[in-house]
Image: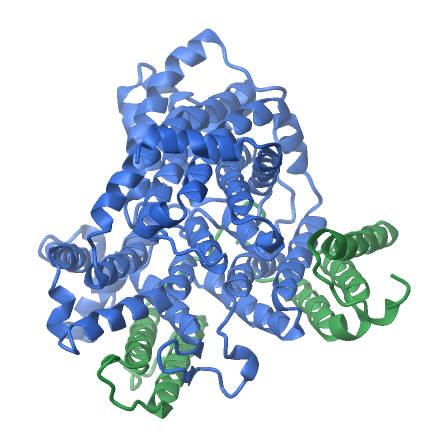
């Protein structure tokens, strides 16, 4: 099957008037929720899931593609016009972008973000179209043992690599896996964690879980810490760039793309690392290093491109392996499952037209973003001034509506409230949200693969290691898990001055406390490195 | 460590221990629930329905213990920031509790009074809890949103939200 001809077929599907309309709706909706604080693409897609049941899956996914890219772009608008980034992936954009806006160059900052996103998104989507079939070709040969290993890797990587505290990440993962256990066991039909409640027998609806954790938890959290003095939104006209700006932007766009895509495609990629790498690189390569920290356009162009390329990269493991690596992809995976579509290597064979239409609509969505967002930037800036009581009341209103409309039972709203309270607690105590969501969604799939693996090997645990890929993945897992301990060992042998003083203040329990202090100090230092607590993945605006 | 005289002072300001407690409780619940399952040994399913719950329970309990130790030794989770979040002031329960009230009211009302009424209560109540004092404007927006979503879902999506008390009117 030829990539180009399949892609052309995809364009033919995606460019029908109805599907184009859904793409436009998706892009507008995505940008709006990306711009608005408190909302993100993951939550929006979760909320829209029940609504999209009446649509063709193709149309639904075309809309989701628009929301996905729109949300990414909208997030950067917010971080340029307000100084507080809502998504961890736009933290870096905020550094230079907001400085530019304050210096009266908001139009140029938004323009380089928009055009950079377009360039990176287009290249990233092209890479996706080329890479995904290659990954599929490789992936069809994989059996259950390999899938089991790869999914474990994704869970551990997201838990252990992202976020500021590994311990809290694992706690969140445990809660997510426990939520995923609820309901009837698929093999034996026994009810797990249902407490005799028949309404729980089908398990917790992923829509309810996602909406509760993202939307209700966020609304409650913001309500508890509502900013008393509203933030200053910097007014902006139509974005444009001068010749000099173009000259300084195009290379960072390309370099940012090169950073973003591979990281997005990795199991624990995410957009934080590549945006940061891109920023550092641009700062080093810039002919105007003195402008960095005062509003250098390269510092917006590079990270924005990296952010969007990572978004495209994330689609590769999702489509080719059925492996989500960020919150939005996780919710999209749930959407595939709810439509009765199994993502993974078979997807390209069994649902070829849908996949290619989805990829084509990623191209279209990107183009629409550029077309729509350049003229609409002033409107997005106005949206930012929506009175906060209406914004968060609206979030609760639509969260309730979305969760209720799945099964039309008030019991789901009780679950929404309980899980929303859990989401509140997680935000309060710094438990990252992403491991929980991935645990809920991947947990049952991991269990399925584990059972299939041991069924094939007739109960012999050696079956887990029966494929070379599985063994390779386990080695990577071991490295990820052991690495921090090696670091700790290294730090103990080369103690930093701060650690020494920490030990000196608490010398009451000599042997044990020394170890404990090292542990907690390393958690703390990790925390301060991680920026301002944005460890919830890029779906949680 | 519990024998140390500074126990109370250590517990002070360590509300995060509650998280450890919650994790531990969740772990125990998962464990007890898994013990109750019966698994006839079967050749086709050597793993059985108990294995994953045991692993999850173990993970939760280990995390619970480690988190408790971490907190007692001064570790602290980083509260999440955001555009509208100002972490410099303590949690404002005077906002959160009425907000929860509006949410619970909606749960209690939705099946009996119907979505249009319960949705209105939810939006108006939430906006009020969050500090909006434009009573009339809020009311109009609430009613409009509820009616629009009711008809939108019914006509556009074929999802019949409950009409409740207003059955026949709508």
Nearer the observer, A182 or A21: A21
- Residue A46 x, y percent position in the rendering: 54, 55
The quadrant where residue B34 appears: bottom left
Which residue extends farthest left? A493
x%, y% of residue A15?
A: 54, 30
| A87 sits left or right of B34 in the view | right
Q: Nearer the viewer, residue A519 or A199?
A: A199
Looking at this view, name the residue that lies furthest to the right.
Answer: B169
Q: Colour of chain B?
A: green
Question: Can see residue B55?
Answer: yes
Q: Residue at x 19, y 71 (%)?
A: A456
Does residue B133 appear in this view? no
* Rendering colour mode: by chain
Q: Where is residue B72, by image quadrant?
A: bottom left
Q: Is A534 placed above or below B124 here?
A: above
- Pinpoint residue A204: horizontal percent, then vertical percent: 50, 71
* Chain A colour as displayed: blue
Total labels: the figure holds: 0
Q: Nearer the viewer, residue A256 or B125?
A: A256
Seen in the picture, residue A387 relative to A251 is either above or below; the reply is below
Q: Is A350 left, or right, of A481 in this rendering?
A: right
Residue at horizontal 75%, vertical 73%? Answer: B111
Residue at 49% x, 40% y is A65
Q: Seen in the image, is A10 located left or right of residue A103?
A: left
The relative height of residue A257 versus residue A243 in the rendered view (above or below) is below
Residue A406 picture location, percent across and down: 61, 64
Where is B6 relative to B149, above or below?
Answer: below
Residue at point 48% right, 55% down?
A335
């Amino acid at each position: 099957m030829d990539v180009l001809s399949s892609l052309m077929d995809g364009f033919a599907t995606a460019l029908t008037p109805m599907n184009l309309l859904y793409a436009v709706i998706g892009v507008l909706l995505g940008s709006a929720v990306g711009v608005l604080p408190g909302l993100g693409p993951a939550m929006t897609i979760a909320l829209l899931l029940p609504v999209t049941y009446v649509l063709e899956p193709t149309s639904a996914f075309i809309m989701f593609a628009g929301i996905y890219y729109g949300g990414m772009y909208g997030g950067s608008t917010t971080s340029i016009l307000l100084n507080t980034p809502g998504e961890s992936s736009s933290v870096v954009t905020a550094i230079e972008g907001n400085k530019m806006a304050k210096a009266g160059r908001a139009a140029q900052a938004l323009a380089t973000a928009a055009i950079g996103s377009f360039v990176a998104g287009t290249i990233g989507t092209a890479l996706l179209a080329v890479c995904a079939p290659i990954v599929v070709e490789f992936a069809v040969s994989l059996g259950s043992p390999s899938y089991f290993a790869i999914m474990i890797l994704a869970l551990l990587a997201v838990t252990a690599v992202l976020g500021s505290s590994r311990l809290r990440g694992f706690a969140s993962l445990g809660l997510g896996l426990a939520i995923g256990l609820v309901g009837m066991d698929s093999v034996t039909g026994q009810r797990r964690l249902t407490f005799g409640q028949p309404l729980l027998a089908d398990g917790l609806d992923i829509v309810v879980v996602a909406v509760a954790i993202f939307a209700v938890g966020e609304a409650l959290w913001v309500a508890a810490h509502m900013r008393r003095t509203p933030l200053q939104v910097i007014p902006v006209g139509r974005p444009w760039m001068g010749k000099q700006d173009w000259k300084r932007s195009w290379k960072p766009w390309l370099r940012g793309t090169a950073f973003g895509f591979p990281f997005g495609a990795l199991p624990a990629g995410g957009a934080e690392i590549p945006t940061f790498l891109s920023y550092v690189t641009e700062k080093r390569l810039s002919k105007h290093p003195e402008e960095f920290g005062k509003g250098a356009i390269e510092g917006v162009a590079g990270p924005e491109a990296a952010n969007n390329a990572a978004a495209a990269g994330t689609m590769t493991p999702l489509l080719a392996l059925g492996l989500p690596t960020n919150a939005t992809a996780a919710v999209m995976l749930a959407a595939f499952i709810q439509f009765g579509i199994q993502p993974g290597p078979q997807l390209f064979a069994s649902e070829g037209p849908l996949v290619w239409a989805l990829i084509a609509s990623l191209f279209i969505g990107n183009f629409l973003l550029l077309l729509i967002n350049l003229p609409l930037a002033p409107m997005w800036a106005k949206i930012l001034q929506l009175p906060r009581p209406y914004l968060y009341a609206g979030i609760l209103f639509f969260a309730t509506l979305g969760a209720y409309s799945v099964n039309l039972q008030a019991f789901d709203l009780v679950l929404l409230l309980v899980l929303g309270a859990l989401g509140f607690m997680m935000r309060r105590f710094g438990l990252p949200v992403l491991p929980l969501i991935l645990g809920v969604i991947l947990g049952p799939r991991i269990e399925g693969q584990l059972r299939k693996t041991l069924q094939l090997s007739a109960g012999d645990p050696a079956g887990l290691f029966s494929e070379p890929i599985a063994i390779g993945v386990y080695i990577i897992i071991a490295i990820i898990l052991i690495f921090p301990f090696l670091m700790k060992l290294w730090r103990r042998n080369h103690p930093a001055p701060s650690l020494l003083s920490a030990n000196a203040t608490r010398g009451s329990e000599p042997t044990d406390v020394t170890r404990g202090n090292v542990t907690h100090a390393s958690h703390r230092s990790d925390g301060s490195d991680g920026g301002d607590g944005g460890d919830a993945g890029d779906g949680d605006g | 460590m519990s024998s140390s005289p500074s126990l109370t002072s250590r517990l002070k300001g360590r509300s995060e221990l509650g998280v450890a407690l919650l994790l531990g409780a969740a772990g125990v619940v998962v464990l007890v629930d898994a013990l109750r399952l019966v698994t006839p040994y079967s050749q086709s399913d050597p793993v059985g329905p108990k294995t994953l719950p045991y692993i999850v329970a173990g993970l939760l309990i280990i995390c619970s213990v480690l988190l408790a130790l971490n907190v007692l030794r001064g570790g602290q989770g980083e509260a999440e920031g955001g555009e509208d979040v100002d972490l410099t002031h303590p949690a404002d329960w005077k906002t959160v509790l009425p907000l929860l009230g509006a949410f619970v009211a909606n749960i209690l009302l939705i099946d009996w009074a119907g979505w249009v009424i319960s949705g209105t209560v939810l939006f108006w109540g939430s906006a009020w809890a969050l500090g909006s004092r434009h009573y009339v404007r809020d009311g109009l927006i609430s009613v409009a949103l509820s009616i629009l979503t009711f008809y939108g879902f019914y006509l556009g999506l074929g999802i019949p939200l409950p009409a409740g008390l207003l059955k026949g009117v709508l």
